[in-house]
Image (cartoon, helix red, strand yellow):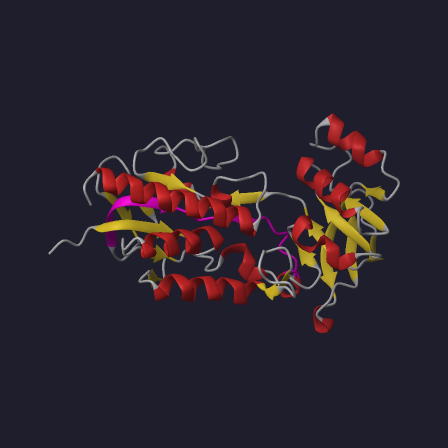
């Protein structure tokens, strides 16, 4: 009996589910390994209003569950667990899941990127309720409000500048008095009247979890030790993401931050291995773009296996 899979998909966010749907409809019987963050970033989001086809919006977890059901209906198989190690040196590729191994003729990596969080006592309870790592996803909900952005690099400046479209005031909080951001991005932020800077300052906590909304941040000046509360309606993290690609170190090309490098959208340097979604896209990071590259990867897998007569 042949236990080698035609295609294994790592990750169960928008990219992974879309790849599963397309490969399942091509009768390739995909196996989806759900990863350590099943559902990806959308599972941490509340109302999604920018995914086409939902004029009234849809809850993030519901959208993900609908995608999963749609792919499963056509024969996609889902399995809990994440890849500990991978051997891409020969085909079939071998994936180690800790207690078992899986072999596959092709591989779609849709393992996403995890947002960097501050690790505050009430932070996780308020994700999707005023704590966010995506300004383009959630900025609209805070029109006419005073909000905060945490960070000192280009990501933070981009978030802050984008959020000035909605907020009456954006306070950018950074733990040092020097910024990692490029000069052009920093200058843009400094010349925007809506952006105010708080340097040498860290966030010790965010309130109010009991109300299920952000009402204030507890701040601390790292030089003076002064602690105070800053009223705010939202806290956006601009401290970057961590691509979930460590299991491929030394086997696939990555950029300086660990994102997988691809050619022609989804091709890695190993034939038969494709990458899609946030694990290779540090620029757009949207549900709809992740779904698009998931589709591309699936179509390339189908073409690759057809070329081998499968």
Q: Residue furthest right?
A: 193
Determine the image quadrant of residue 282.
top right
Question: Please, which residue is most extreme toward the top here?
Answer: 183
Q: Would residue 82 be visible to someone looking at this image?
A: no
Name the one closer to the observer, 152 or 269: 269
Q: Nearer the viewer, residue 217 or 243?
A: 243
Quadrant placement of the C terminus = top left
Residue shown at 48% from the left, 59% from the top: 39
* Residue 168 in picture, x, y percent from top left: 86, 51
Task: Write the residue at 58% across / 38% down.
Answer: 283
Question: Can see residue 164?
Answer: yes
Question: Is 134 positioned to the left or the right of 24 in the image?
Answer: right
Between 246 and 265, the one nearer to me in the picture: 265
Left or right for 106, reference 127: left
The magenta segment:
101-123
Residue 278 image point, x, y percent: 51, 45
Residue 295 magenta: no
Of all residues, the one furthest to the bottom in this rendering is 210
> Can you give x and y, in whole percent of width and height, for residue 260 in the image?
45, 36
Residue 232 position, x and y percent, is: 81, 58
Q: Is residue 226 left or right of residue 250?
A: right
Residue at position x 85%, y 38% from top? 192
Asked if the stretch drawn in magenta spans residue 113, the answer is yes
Q: Which residue is at a point 68% across and 64% down the rendered structure image?
A: 129
- The reply, left or right, for residue 59 in relation to residue 205 is left
The one nearer the camera, 98 or 101, is 101
Query: If the image is split into quadrants, where does the N terminus sit?
Result: bottom left
């Amino acid at each position: 009996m042949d236990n080698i899979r035609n295609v294994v998909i790592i990750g169960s966010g928008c990219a992974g589910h879309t790849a599963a749907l397309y490969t399942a409809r091509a009768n390739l019987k995909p196996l989806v390994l759900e990863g350590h963050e099943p559902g990806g970033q959308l599972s941490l989001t509340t109302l999604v209003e920018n995914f086409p086809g939902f004029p009234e919006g849809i809850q993030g977890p519901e959208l993900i569950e609908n995608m999963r059901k749609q792919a499963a209906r056509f024969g996609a198989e889902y399995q809990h667990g994440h890849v500990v190690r991978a051997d891409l040196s020969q085909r079939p590729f071998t994936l180690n899941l800790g207690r078992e191994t899986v072999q596959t003729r092709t591989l779609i990596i849709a393992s996403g990127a995890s947002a960097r969080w501050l690790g505050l006592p009430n932070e996780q309870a308020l994700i999707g309720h005023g704590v966010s790592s995506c300004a383009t996803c959630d900025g609209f909900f805070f029109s006419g409000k005073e909000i905060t952005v945490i960070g000192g690099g280009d990501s933070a400046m981009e978030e802050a500048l984008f959020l000035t479209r909605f907020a009456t005031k954006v306070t950018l909080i950074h733990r040092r008095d020097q910024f990692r951001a490029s000069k052009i991005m920093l200058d843009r932020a400094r010349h925007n009247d809506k952006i105010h800077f708080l340097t040498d300052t860290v966030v010790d906590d965010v309130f109010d979890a009991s109300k299920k909304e952000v009402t204030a941040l507890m701040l601390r000046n790292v030089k003076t030790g002064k602690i105070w509360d800053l009223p705010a309606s939202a806290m956006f993290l601009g401290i970057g993401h961590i691509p979930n690609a460590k299991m491929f170190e030394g086997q696939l090309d990555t950029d300086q931050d660990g994102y997988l490098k691809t050619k022609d959208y989804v091709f890695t340097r190993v034939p038969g291995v494709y990458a899609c979604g946030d694990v290779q896209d540090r620029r757009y990071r949207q549900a709809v773009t992740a779904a698009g590259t998931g589709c591309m990867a699936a179509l390339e897998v189908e073409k690759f296996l057809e070329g081998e007569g499968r």
